[in-house]
Image (cartoon, rainbow, N blue to C red):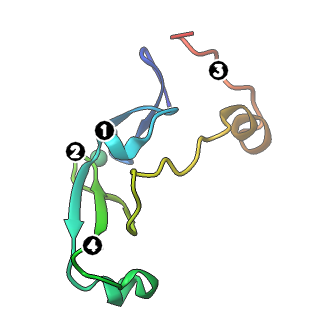
Amino acid sequence: MQSAHGRIVKCDRGQELGDHRQNRKLSALIGVEREGIADVCPIHSGDPERMELREFFCPGCMTLLEAASPGFPIVFDFLTDLEALYRDWLGRPLPADPSA
Ligand SMILES: [Zn+2]
């Protein structure tokens, strides 16, 4: 998504989640679950005192963005290759970055 602030990530309902090069989870609301981890993630069901399931919610609409099994620090999953996305999937060049 292009904005006056550069290339950003938005949730499906339009809430801005920050620069696309940054970890969007860090601008999300984070819920921590310690009960029932074995049900959803058997391989991480060791010591319940040390295990947690993190849920990341959009701060604008409270949509669950994703849930992640335990990991420290909060993992930045991937950086989207915007040029390839536009070229290979949308069939047009990536618009210029207004913040560049
Ligand atoms: Zn939202």
Q: CA distance from mark 3 to mark 2?
A: 28 Å
The local crowd at label 4, few if under 14, some if 14 to 19, many if 20 or more residues have their Cα within 10 Å, is few
Vertical relation: 15 (above or below) 39? above
Labelled pair 4, 1 in contact (Cβ < 8 Å):
no
Q: CA distance from mark 3 to mark 4?
A: 45 Å
Of marks 3 and 4, the one in the foreground? 4
Q: Which residue corresponds to mark 1?
A: 15
Q: Which residue corresponds to mark 4?
A: 50
Mark with earlier residue (4, 1):
1
Q: CA distance from mark 4 to mark 1?
A: 33 Å
Labelled pair 2, 4 in contact (Cβ < 8 Å):
no
Q: CA distance from mark 1 to mark 3?
A: 21 Å
Q: Which residue corresponds to mark 3?
A: 95
The local crowd at label 3, few if under 14, some if 14 to 19, many if 20 or more residues have their Cα within 10 Å, is few
Q: Please, what secondary structure does the residue beneath circle 3 have?
A: loop
Labelled pair 1, 2 in contact (Cβ < 8 Å):
yes
Q: Pick the residue in front: 10 or 26.
A: 26
Of marks 2 and 4, the one in the foreground? 4
Q: Residue at x 29, y 62 (%)?
A: 55
Q: Is mark 2 within 8 Å of ligand 1?
A: yes
Of marks 4 and 1, the one in the foreground? 4
Give amino acid for label 3. Pro
Mark with earlier residue (2, 4):
4
Q: Is mark 1 within 8 Å of ligand 1?
A: yes
Q: Please, what secondary structure does the residue beneath circle 4 have?
A: loop
Where residue 10 sits in the image (x, y, percent)? 40, 39
Task: Point out the image quarter for the C terminus.
Answer: top right
Asked whether, in this view, residue 48 is left or right of residue 7, the answer is: left
Labelled pair 1, 3 in contact (Cβ < 8 Å):
no
Query: Would you identify the image quadrant in which residue 84 lies?
Result: top right
Q: Which residue corresponds to mark 2?
A: 59
